[in-house]
Image (spheres, rainbow, N blue to C red):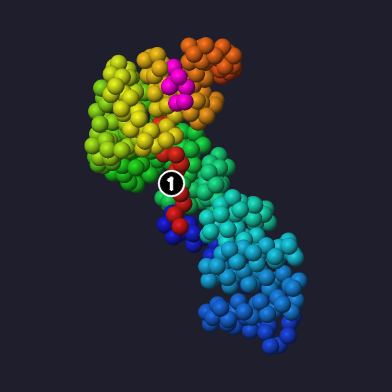
Amino acid sequence: MKNRIFAWGVTALFGFFPFSAVAQSSTPEDAVALQQQGKWDEAAEVWRSVIQKDPKDAAAFASLGVVLSKQQKYLEAASAYKKALALNPKLPGVQLNLGLAEFKQGHFQAAIAPFHAALAADQHNQQTATLLGLSYYGDKRFTEAVKYLEVAVKADPGNAELHDVLAQSCLWAKKYACALDEFRQILQQQPDSAAAHMLSGEALDGLGRTSEAIAEFQTAENVSPKDSNLHFGLGYLFWKSHQYDDAKREFDGALAIDPNHPQALAYLGDIEMRKMNMDEALRLLKMALGAKSDLRFAYIDLGAILMRQKKFADAVAPLQRAEALDPSQPDAHYRLGQTYQALGKTAESQKELARVRELHQKEDDPLASKMSAAPPPLPQ
């Protein structure tokens, strides 16, 4: 988005509002004159003087907010706008300005309501609709973001930054066809973009087209061979396809670049476990958890190995941790139930196994969820 997205709506920030009549010594006209000279500190003081004389002057609060926004004092500006709206909820432009002040602070959730109010007042304001979509994206509410960003992209089809945010929103909303369409458009403009090929691969994987996803990742890897995450992503796709030798090669490639890549370590551990190399598997899994302590997958494999070694008491803790990280997955409940049964804890075992019957095993997670915990943030 660079600076363009954050420049949208700046005109609204520096607009002027109707003013109350106040004493000659510090009048709204004095404040406006100071603003025109760029004397923002002095203008703010005059507006505070106006407000002190008439604490119910909503327009003065709104104008103070404009000056504070010009000074990039967005927290104070938001407070001034809220006071203006408390006095006059229908004062034109203030909801948009409040949304902008919150947005500029990265308070995306707080920006949503005022942007909605501004859009309700002017349903054809594309700037407001775009900012609302970006706020939803910033708040990680991707399904809602898609609704507004699709309209924004249609209104500004040449805006590559908006296409990228829409593509990310579609990907994280699991609207993979939409994501793929957007990434393909990006690739038309940037055919050598490793990131666009990688993200296209993630969308293809989400659509169940894993062989095509592998081809996209291989193209990306040719463009950017020193990216450890690319190697991991391609390795994961091979792992999902049960091509374990190819997966191992890619995971090793990731570790050659980043020796502490936690997921590469974990999946290499899984491959070693499948080959019955339990000591090596344990070493790799423990390294993975040392690098990243919330890898549920690694805890499951660690518990499975300890169970296989009949170290049932030792297996309880990693399986409980896996269960806590995602209680909706039945595999941890099942293994924990078996472990309790081996330890003679019948009641605990029955409870865990009963939970298994209530749940359904999910398929392998889509690659997008493995590559990153969240999409890229909006740039500041």
- Left or right: residue 136 versus residue 205 is right
The C terminus lies in quadrant: bottom left
Image coordinates of residue 320 in percent, x first then y, are 50, 25
How crowded pointer 1 is (Cα within 10 Å; few <14, some 14-19, many 20+) is rated as: few
Q: Which secondary structure, mark 1?
A: loop
The N terminus lies in quadrant: bottom left
* Residue 159 to residue 300: above or below: below
Query: Magenta segment: does it hold 127?
Result: no
Q: Residue at x 72, y 69 (%)?
A: 58
Image coordinates of residue 310 in percent, x first then y, are 40, 14
* Residue 189 to residue 6: above or below: above
Q: Residue at x 58, y 70 (%)?
A: 68
* Residue 234 to residue 55: above or below: above
Image coordinates of residue 145 in percent, x first then y, are 54, 44
| Viewer-nearest residue: 215 or 373 | 373
Q: Can the viewer see residue 365?
A: no
Q: Residue at x 74, y 73 (%)?
A: 55
Image coordinates of residue 195 in percent, x first then y, are 34, 42
Q: Quadrant of residue 207?
A: top left
Q: Residue at x 48, y 28 (%)?
A: 321
Q: Which portion, as a residue range, is magenta?
A: 312-318
Residue topped by disc 1: 376
Q: Amino acid at mark 1?
A: Pro
Q: How many marks?
A: 1
* Residue 187 to residue 378: above or below: above
Query: Magenta segment: does it hold 316?
Result: yes
- Left or right: residue 261 versus residue 43 is left
| Viewer-nearest residue: 358 or 308 | 308
